[in-house]
Image (cartoon, grey):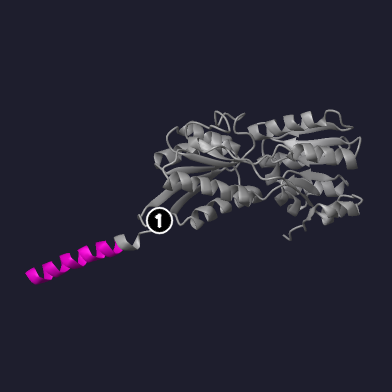
Amino acid sequence: MRKWLSFTIVAVIGSIVLVACGSDDANGDGDTFQIGATQIVEHPSLDAAYDGFKDALDDQGLDVEYDFQSAQNDVSNAGTIGKNFVSDDVDLIFANSTPSAMGAKQATSDIPIVFTSVTDAEIAGLVESNDEPGENVTGVVDLHPDQITRTIEFIDDNFPDSTIGMVYNAGEENSVVQVEYVKEALEGTTLDMTDRSISTSAEVQQAASSLVGEADVFYIITDNTAVSALESIIGVANDNDMPLFVGEPDSVEKGGFMAFGFDYYDLGYRSGEMAAEILTDDKEAGELSVEFPPNVEVYMNKEAAEAQGIDWKDEWEEDANLVETEEE
């Protein structure tokens, strides 16, 4: 009996040692980090940013367990998710969108928050300044200073005297900021603007349809509500020969005509690198400056141009990245 008991104790101790050894990650310290990942809604650009974030941490050799929660395009849910992560005592929150970042910030001043897909972190009140964020928040914004200006210039050069129709959610701070930038960019051009405000993705098609006859072209900024129902806007644009300008390349691939933008995967990847610095180097989030996307590039969809009654110009192909409409 004593021999059997002794053998059992030794075996148990050996098992514990083996499990401990097997749990060591590439950092060599055996840490497993708990990250709460939240985004306002699921659509291609935000999903690509999340993929980039995870790949960056994986490339850094970190052992990470993720708790992903979508707010299903409900701002109140974003706040609740932030509180849930605080209750779970996660090591870091990845906030993918302005509403998600704001919900997380309202929930905690202690847990580090790294965001992306945020239009203007200063205006949203997420950071004290981009250079010196302060507190527990930093990340990568998704609006280059030239992005909207170049889009308006392109429309003015190629579709002069047009009225631009916009559909956006006035409850999204990031969208309100962009609409104001559009209004500023319109000064001194031949263009005018009209808009429709929506609250849910179910309202998008009706809003777009109501602009037919009033607007000549569409411009859909990186509004999460509108982009989540982009197919309905594409349908209206194609049926009524209205050029559809969008805010990022993923929407061009969906069937938008043109965008000045960048790859959201890259934004998420850089956010992941910043998160790794915080988790492994004992850096405070507020010590890392908010970063901007690289220089924007033009993306154009020749199939969409044909579907929207646009006379294609060969000169566009010289500088544009040509994108094909993805198959459903």
* Residue at the spot 50% in from the left edge and 31% down from the top edge: 134
Which one is in front, 265 or 213? 265
Q: Main secondary structure of the magenta part?
A: helix
**What is the crowding at mark 1: few (fewer than 14 residues within 10 Å), some, or many (at least 20)?**
few
Which one is in front, 33 or 37? 33
Above or below 7: residue 169: above
Which one is in front, 173 or 114? 114
- The residue range painted magenta reads 1-19
* Residue at the spot 43% in from the left edge and 46% down from the top edge: 279
* Residue at the spot 60% in from the left edge and 33% down from the top edge: 121
Which one is in front, 110 or 218? 110
Circle 1 sits in a helix, a strand or a loop, which is it?
Answer: loop
Task: Tell me the quarter of the image containing the C terminus.
Answer: bottom right
**Is residue 16 part of the magenta span, yes or no?**
yes
Residue 119: image location, x then y, percent: 64, 37
Relative horizontal placement of residue 155, taking residue 116 as reference (left or right): right
Residue 92: image location, x then y, percent: 45, 43
* Residue at the spot 92% in from the left edge and 51% down from the top edge: 311
Quarter where residue 204 is shown: top right
Task: Tell me the quarter of the image containing the N terminus.
Answer: bottom left
Q: Amino acid at mark 1?
A: Asn
| Residue behind mark 1 | 27
Relative horizontal placement of residue 143, taking residue 195 as reference (left or right): left
Above or below 107: residue 250: below
